[in-house]
Image (tube, rainbow, N blue to C red):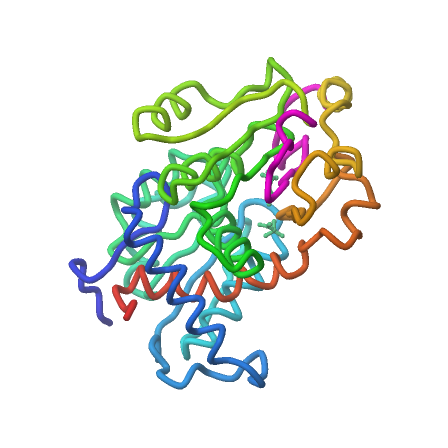
Amino acid sequence: MQTNKSLMRHFINIKDIPGKELKKIILDAKKRKAKRKNFNTLDIDKDSPLKGKLLIQMFEKSSLRTRLSFYIAIKQLNGGALTLRPDELHLNKGGESLSDTAKIISTFGNAFMLRTNSEEKLNILKKYLTIPLINGLSPKSHPTQVLSDVFTIEEIKKKSISKLKICWVGDSNNVLNSLIEASVKFSFKLNIGCPKKYEPNKDLLNWAKKNKGNVKIFYDSKKAASGCDVVFTDKVISMNDKVNKTQKLINFKNFKVTQAVMKCAKKDAIFLHCLPRGPEVSNEVFLGKKSKVFQQALNRIYVQKSILLYCFDKLR
Ligand code: CP
Ligand code: NVA
């Protein structure tokens, strides 16, 4: 099996990937999507770039969209996917070390996509895997989601995201962290509306500031949305969020995306949500005309493909 270390890259955090490469991923996804008009889901892209490659994926937390999109993505590139259940590995019962597991995965497969409860696990795997590692959501980031969202925004708005003002209303969670990182890499304005005690991580905000980021925090959802092109939100209670859920939901009661919030954004503003959803958005907004959440979800396939190609150093 081929394991040429110099020709592979991990995709773990947006922050650590050069902006130029991220833009190449978006461009490749645009070109590939355009070429698939009238293709069936499992038809293979004409250039068949990942022929014979095996993507191994594992989810330590639930997933619908990430699971489906990576499966379809690798298939369309002419590779195959195998999903491991963490409860069926020796690893989770303490019978095998993470480093040995990583070495085995590296010799059997060609890329590993992991949704995990632990940043530490990503760090250890990065050390021992000799194949690309893709972060399919961790407690601190959700990079594949956010890169795909940049794609969706540019597709709908038909302009570079650097010319747009993006708003996030809600919790300072993994998705927002990746969005902050993306705001620096893609040079877009980001307004965040959240309760005072739920501000984003200070180190991340300092990193954004140091790197010419344009991130503004508001303690008012309407002020945050004012004049924006896109309004995002996400669940107040994320998977494995170990908090007093009732209290947290109360603390966020003024940070729900309603029609009144959408009215503060630009007239042609769109609403995005990575899903799954909770009470952070009204049904009216979620199912309304401005909502592009289903296009957003489907686009995950196209961007996962270009992320995979980036990892294999196969972006044209
Ligand atoms: N948005 C997202 O990552 O969805 P899943 O949790 O269903 O994969
Ligand atoms: N912030 C959410 C995203 C789900 C895709 C979570 O981590 O549960």
Q: Residue at x 71, y 19 (%)?
A: 244
Residue 252 position (above or below residue 225): above
The quadrant holding residue 249 is top right
In this view, the residue farthest toward the right is 284
Q: Nearer the viewer, residue 74 or 168?
A: 168
Q: Residue at x 35, y 55 (%)?
A: 23
Q: Nearer the viewer, residue 315 or 239?
A: 315
Magenta stretch: dominant SS?
Answer: loop
Residue 200: x and y, percent?
51, 23
The quadrant holding residue 97 is top left
In the rendered structure, the answer to whether residue 3 lies left or right of residue 271 reads: left
Q: Residue at x 51, y 50 (%)?
A: 145
Q: Nearer the viewer, residue 149 or 212?
A: 212
Quarter of the image with the C terminus in it: bottom left
Q: Which residues are magenta?
A: 222-245
Q: Residue at x 46, y 28 (%)?
A: 215
Residue 58 position (above or below residue 124): below
Residue 231: x and y, percent?
63, 40
Please tell me whether residue 230 belongs to the stretch shown in magenta.
yes
Quarter of the image with the N terminus in it: bottom left
Residue 48: x and y, percent?
37, 82
In the rendered structure, the answer to whether residue 238 lies left or right of residue 120 reads: right
Please tell me whether residue 236 belongs to the stretch shown in magenta.
yes
In this view, the residue farthest toward the top is 197
Residue 99 position (above or below residue 220): below
Q: How many marks?
A: 0
Residue 246 position (above or below residue 131): above
